[in-house]
Image (tube, rainbow, N blue to C red):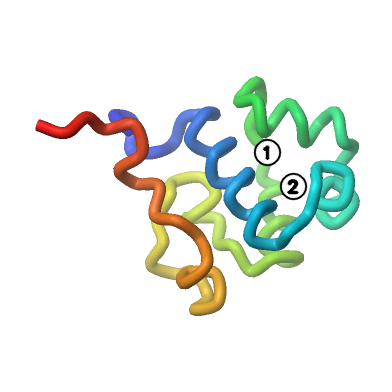
Amino acid sequence: MADGGRSNKDIAMRLAALMSVLDENQSQFAMRIGVSQPALNNYLKGIRRPDIDVAIRIQMKTGATLDWIYLGDRSGLPARLLEALPDLSDHGKKAI
């Protein structure tokens, strides 16, 4: 993550991981966070990133922090999510 994990693709990976931990499909997660399924699909494909209002709803409904959603910073995640979510910070880095 050359950009520090801020790309739409990186955010998409984190949202997909969060959905998996919550054991929810796109329709269920979209309903939970108050967006349409097509809008969520755009987030998951990396076409768009959730705007701040959507990200705040994700935080309120799941406990995932804004720092984690947008930056991949795991330090403020609640323990239950910290244990369940994979550390994606090295995703895509090649072994040297």
Image position of 46 with respect to 73: above or below: above
Residue type beneath disc 2: Val
Residue 35 in the image, given as x and y percentages of width and height? 86, 42
Of the residues shown, which amino acid type is indicated by label 1? Pro
Q: Nearer the viewer, residue 90 or 52?
A: 90
Q: Quadrant of the C terminus?
A: top left
Residue that numbered label 1 is attached to: 50
Residue ID at (38%, 67%): 75
* 61 sits to left or right of 83: right
User: Residue 62 sits in which quadrant?
Assistant: bottom right
Dot 1 falls on a residue whose secondary structure is loop
**64 lies above or below 72:** below
Mark seen at residue 73: none
Q: Which residue is mark 2?
A: 54
Q: Secondary structure at mark 2?
A: helix
Report the residue at 59% width, 36% height from top. 12
- Tell me whether the residue at label 1 lies in contact with that at label 2, contact meaning CB atoms closer than 8 angstroms: yes
| Horizontal arrangement in the rendering, residue 89 relative to residue 11 (left or right) | left
Q: Percent from the top left, x then y, of residue 40?
A: 77, 36
Residue ID at (76%, 30%): 41
Q: Position of residue 69 (x, y in %)?
A: 54, 50
Query: How packed is label 1: few (under 14 Cα within 10 Å), some, or many (20 or more)?
Result: many
Residue extending farthest left: 96
Location of residue 8 with respect to 56 vertically, above or below: above
Residue most toward the bottom? 79
Q: Quadrant of the N terminus?
A: top left
**Which residue appears farthest toward the top when viewing the image?**
47
The residue at the point 58 percent across, 50 percent down is 17
Q: On the picture, is 30 further left or further right than 82? A: right
Q: CA distance from mark 1 to mark 2?
A: 6 Å
Measured from the top left, where is residue 47 in percent x and y?
65, 20
